[in-house]
Image: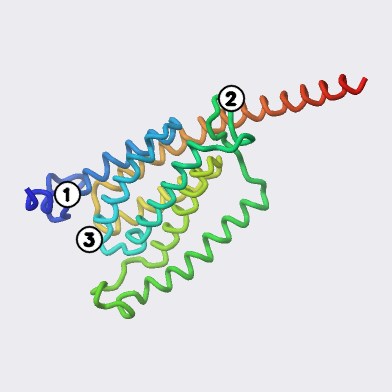
Amino acid sequence: MFGVLTDWFSLNNHLFEFMGQKVSSLELTSTITGLLCVFLAVKGKVANFWVGYIYNIFLFLLFYQTKAYSSMFLQPISLAINLFGHYRWTHPKENEKDQKSDLKVTIFNRGQRIVVAAIILIFAFVWGYFLSRVDVWIPSLFSSAAKLPYFDAFILGTILTAQYLSAQKKLECWGCWMVANISNIILCHRLGLGMMPLVYAGYMVLAVGGFIIWYKKFRKQHYLDLRKQVEQKWASQQADI
């Protein structure tokens, strides 16, 4: 039984070829789990976090074996953010609730968006430098050099940002996901992963859909909040008369 599981989660266990690239059982499992996770997130379902926990484990194994160390290091952090998001979505503060008492969708202002972009770029430079030297500094764990360290680091920073914004139900999370998906398509192609670029293309479609759905929710809730403020102001003025 253990041997079967070991083989299933190995990149060398090829099931078929797709667009000239061999697809392993691990890559296929990650593909299905990832698509399900994003689909549930687009729908605003809390179940996306439970699927996300499993997805983190699969991706950790996948990127370790492809030597995409930055993406590998992302998974434990991603797991922690998922736990945080799971709590935030199920325990919103009173002023954060929508009409269904769920965590409502909110947005950043322009200045906040600029700060977020700057943080991603600075992180990519610092973490990329570390990755470019990780095989020299920690040769016992990493026997060969990381592939595309700065590009991999940029993807890591973008995904971490997207996950944190998703946990807070910020509309801008979908913009970060779109950038991350395009970058991951390029990265996976360079790493020789045949199925994962298609997965990230699917993620892109879901990200666009997620943005549209969340934007509609934001506009609806924004209207309800404004109407509530007007009604409260009017009631206050009537009470003063």
Q: Residue at 52% of width from left, 62% of height from top?
A: 121
Which amino acid type is marked by label 2?
Gln
Which amino acid type is marked by label 3?
Gln
Q: Closer to us: mark 2 or mark 1? A: 2
Residue highlighted by disc 3: 65
Q: CA distance from mark 3 to mark 2?
A: 46 Å
Q: Quadrant of the C terminus?
A: top right
**Residue 2, position in %: x, y?**
9, 51
Asked which quadrant contains residue 130, the reply is bottom left
Q: Earlier in the sequence, mark 3 or mark 1?
A: 1
Q: Residue at 57% of width from left, 56% of height from top?
A: 117
Residue highlighted by disc 2: 99
Name the element at disc 2: loop
Tag of residue 24: 1
Q: Residue at 81% of width from left, 21% of height from top?
A: 235
Name the element at disc 1: strand
Which amino acid type is marked by label 1?
Ser
**Residue 7, position in %: x, y?**
10, 52
Q: Closer to us: mark 3 or mark 2? A: 2
